Image (tube, rainbow, N blue to C red):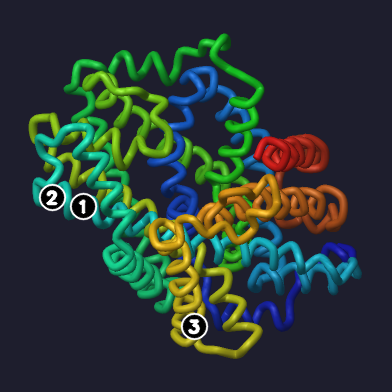
Amino acid sequence: MSESSAPISGAMKGSNAKRGLWSSRLAFILAATGSAVGLGNVWKFPYITGENGGGAFVLVYLLCIAAIGLPIMMAEVLIGRRGGRSPVNSLREIARHDKLNPAWPIVGAIGVIAGFLILSFYSVIGGWAASYVVKAGSGQLAGQSADAIGAIFSDLLADPATLLMWHTLFMALVMLVVAKGVRAGLERAVSILMPALFLLLLTVVGYAMTTGEFGRAVTFLFQPDFSKLTTSGILVALGHAFFTLSLGMAVMMAYGSYLPKNISIAKTSIAVCVIDTGVALLAGLAIFPIVFANGLEPGAGPGLIFQTLPLAFAQMPMGSLFGTLFFVLLIFAAWTSGISLLEPIVEWLEEQKGMNRTTSTLGAGFVCWALGITSILSLNLWSDFAPLGAISMLEGKTIFDLLDFFTANILLPLGGLLIAVFAGWVMSRQAMEDELALSKPMFRLWYITVRYITPVAVGAVFIYNLIGS
């Protein structure tokens, strides 16, 4: 074995031993799936599917998961395990060991920063879901008209004190888990939350089957009508396939650093992609029958979950019960993703600043919570404040909008593109073969994909997001 392909050891081994590893392949799959399964699956996927015509969009989305999402996920996990540290330091160790350009750790930093910024406003949205558990459970939505449901959501966004309370609760839940470490925190939490999430989702799907419109929903999701598919829809599918798997956020590198050497990166990555995609499709099967049964619009946009569906629950028998279950499901999905978004920065603080787990979690969590307050205020008191409004493409964008724009349209695709370039063109091929342990034909397929297809596809999303914004 050449020096460039030899496993990185020494300090790395000590680091892994000290920080802990996942106890099993299942633990990693649950954690990585918990990261991937979030608001993107239960909130965003159904409404973008509705906006883009259903089945043809779903088919393109599935192809993009296989051609873009899976190769980059494997690359991120590979880099994390190879380096054995936080995303920034893993890239630094690989660059040092293989005598590469020392600037490559910047790619890890881009992901860490992106995840941190996303969590600051993701927590606010998680707070919305928490507030709706109470609204649905207490019967506040029962029997309400469309205008009344819309007013409930508008009143929530207009109340900074209430938003702050729910945002604080959500961040506290995330910090509580991350502070306990890999096995006692992350692994234990996902081993409870993920099975509970699947059970809740299946329960809501079971209810959706009783609405009389389940067959129509199946046809809508799985019967392609390519006349409804536009170039824009293809790029949306491509972009969502990338983002739904928590790629470009340094999460998979962080989780990969805890992955034992005897566990297959390819098999675990495939399992995560399959489960994540399955959850998104189940979410569609849970939501669209309810939407169709109540004569609502499947392409209702971002308001589908917080305005359209509550209207349906308000009119359904046992609507309060199933509405409550649905929003509990939404919280679990957001919580597992929130945990993963905080982990990379906490891991880095432990290594770089010598902080213990609790201190690093409290420090990073507090700063993230404080930044989230600016997003809360941009929904009400600062709703007219557009910090970068002088730039035409950013005109009218509030702080909340800007955080969403810069992370989704710039940092994530840029990070994903650079990861693909690093794996496909820079990192030692022999080192990757050793880490992936694939047959020669399968490795060659992955290598060609991550080297040529994935960078072009992610680059197309990147350019489209900038031009189309």
Q: Residues within 10 Å of mark 1 (few under 14, many from 20)?
A: many
Residue at the location (22% across, 32% down)?
A: 146
> In the rendering, at what x and y percent does residue 42 appear?
38, 41
> In the rendering, at what x and y percent does residue 169 appear?
30, 69
Q: Which residue is mark 2?
A: 137
* 376 is higher (above) or lower (below) than 235: below
Circle 3: residue type? Gly
Q: Nearer the viewer, residue 191 or 407?
A: 407
Query: Residue 127 is drawn in which quadrant?
Result: bottom left
* 149 is higher (above) or lower (below) than 98: above
Looking at the image, residue 65 sits to the left or right of residue 10; the answer is left
Query: Residue 307 is drawn in which quadrant?
Result: top left
> In the rendering, at what x and y percent does residue 385 appear?
52, 59
Q: Could you tell which of marks 1 and 3 lies nearer the N-terminus?
A: 1
Looking at the image, residue 467 sits to the left or right of residue 394; the answer is right
Q: CA distance from mark 1 to mark 3?
A: 29 Å
* 102 is higher (above) or lower (below) than 341: below
Q: Secondary structure at mark 3?
A: helix
Q: Residues within 10 Å of mark 3 (few under 14, many from 20)?
A: some
Q: CA distance from mark 3 to mark 2?
A: 34 Å
Circle 2: residue type? Gly
Indicate which disc residue 133 carries. Answer: 1
Query: Residue 103 is drawn in which quadrant?
Result: bottom right
Q: Are marks 1 and 2 in contact (CB under 8 Å)?
A: yes
Q: Are marks 1 and 3 in contact (CB under 8 Å)?
A: no
Q: Residues within 10 Å of mark 2 (few under 14, many from 20)?
A: some
Residue at the location (63% across, 26% down)?
A: 232
Residue at the location (27% across, 35% down)?
A: 309
Indicate which disc residue 363 carries. Answer: 3
Looking at the image, residue 140 sits to the left or right of residue 282; the answer is left
